Image (spheres, rainbow, N blue to C red):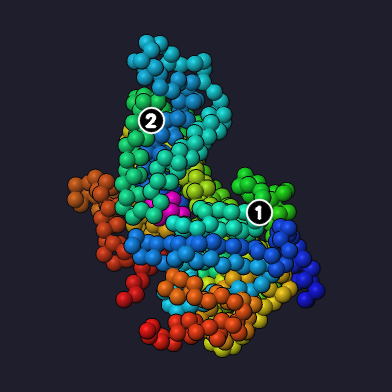
Amino acid sequence: MNVHIREDMSRHTLRADDGIATGGDLLKVDNISLSFGGVKAISDISFDVRKGEIRAIIGPNGAGKTSMLNVINGFYHPQEGVITFRGKTRSRMRPHEAARQGIARTFQNIALFKGMSTLDNIMTGRITLQKRNMFWHGLWAGPAEREEIEHREAVEGIIDFLEIEHIRKTPVGSLPYGLQKRVELGRALAAEPALLLLDEPMAGMNLEEKEDMSRFILDVNQQFGTTIALIEHDMGVVMDLSDRVVVLDYGRKIGDGPPDEVRNNQDVIDAYLGVPHE
Amino acid sequence: MSPDFLNFIETFLNGLMAGVMYSLVALGFVLIFKASGIFNFAQGVMALFAALTLVGFQTGQVPFAHLIRAIFGVEILHWGAGMPTILALILTMGVMVALAFLIERLVLKHLVNQAPIILFMATIGLAWFLEGLGDLMWGADIKPMDVGLPSGGSFWWEDLTATWAAQGSDYYGMYIDTLDVSAAIIAVALVVALSLFSQYTATGRALRAVADDHQAALSVGISLRRIWVIVWSLAGFVALVAGILWGAKSGVQFSLSLIALKALPVLILGGFTSIPGAIVGGLIIGVGEKLAEAYIGPLVGGAIENWFAYMLALAFLLFRPQGLYGEKIIERI
């Protein structure tokens, strides 16, 4: 079973083949500032994500973590700063274009297609990889059918990997929370992303579900070599999973480095423990 | 069987077939409402516009002929003998796709993230514009629509049902219009084709995804603008079919655009987001108004067919505001 999956995933890495060596800069955000009217959500933040690593973004509530993710995948357009992804610099980009460049994501409050089955949800993840246009789809023959079968096989590989075979045909709206999170991860993986953004993948989970999810995240990173940037509140999980951590507070960057270094950073401790500033 | 019972069946059947036609119009509304949350007031006018364009192509009318005459003084109302129906159909569909493209480019694109009421008002404007454009392009006279559908009463059915009545009664058999039957068959085929397309193709999956959650659809790489063009094209296609069937029944004329008003009670019954709802709602309205006319009408002086549908819709609003199949609105407080 595992061999089959790995074979499948060797194909997955094809898209990540962009000439950037493992450890090189996959994503660089430079001096990003974002405000809504008079409210500054992010001020002058810069950091990088290296190819092949798991990068965590942490910080107290309202620190600007999700805003940062929304900037990276194009939901928000920052007023200042530039983003360089896979060697290409851009300042404005629409979300579906970001997806086409290889950025996939999950959401804090789960954004699945609730009326659709698990299988259909994960199949939509492959939309950026489908090349036939709707006239072929309408005919449902020849190239479109071959393509559909090919994508279906890849999706079955992901379903096996995430151990959700039993809910393949269930409408996701009726699934328990933990499984919905897993389906959402599956949909993001289906796009064979170069960069996977996870917004609180373990929020609201019990211990067992958290352990499962951590294992999946590590497997995705190690088996498929997918670069991951994640937001998470559970410090234990963050320190165990991530290679490097960036810490935000009130829209500013207050720490950046390996977990151990960040853990001992006085600014970070203050932000989390709420020590009054002198 | 007693003639009374046979009369009931006849009324019921005619109601069903009228209902299918209502469903067809309602379907155009549901498609757009599901995918973009817009109540497209222009759906009826789109049916009129499509029918006008089709007849214009068929009969070889020159578009904007009167405008050209007014400006340049050149009188060219017709070119040759027109074109075969099938070619005219393809060209008209092309026009409807182009229209969808223009609507997205000129209207929707600029109104992204606006409140639904703003988009609704934009479609009212669109309705007025299209109505004027249709008149300007093809003229405002009433035109017959002939795409080769059979029409007239079915003698076969009349003779067959005449034998059903009890011996000795003076029952002449049921009247059923073959045009209504073919319209019903076409409408059913269209609905089946649309549901297969949305269930089993990648584009259909994208359409359902957008209808379900815009944000999530964007994040997996679906371009909303492309989907909107596709949805409005599909609605244009449904409008074309509705325009042909209604046009064949009552001629292509301005009142065609008012069929949109008949779709309103259908939508209230069926729910704005449900394709099966549009179908069942249409059938209930169709059967309901024909039966009401036949059985309640004589008691109150007749002509209740015109308002019965709205009364039914009003009653539904009181007891089941989300419609038969619509999504129930649950508000967390």
Residue at disc 2, secondary structure = helix
| Chain ID, mark 2 | B
Q: Which mark is residue B12?
A: none
Disc 2 marks a residue whose amino acid type is Gly
Q: Residue at x 72, y 70 (%)?
A: A224
Q: Quadrant of the N terminus of chain A?
A: bottom right
Q: Which mark is residue B134?
A: 2
Highlighted range, magenta: B32-39
Asked whether residue B208 appears in the rendered view, the answer is no
Q: Which residue is mark 1?
A: A130
B36 drawn magenta? yes
Q: Residue at x 46, y 51 (%)?
A: B31
Counting from the top left corner in percent of width and height, residue A87 is at: 65, 56
Residue at disc 1, secondary structure = loop
Q: Residue B5: name its quadrant.
A: bottom left
Q: Residue A36: name its quadrant.
A: bottom left
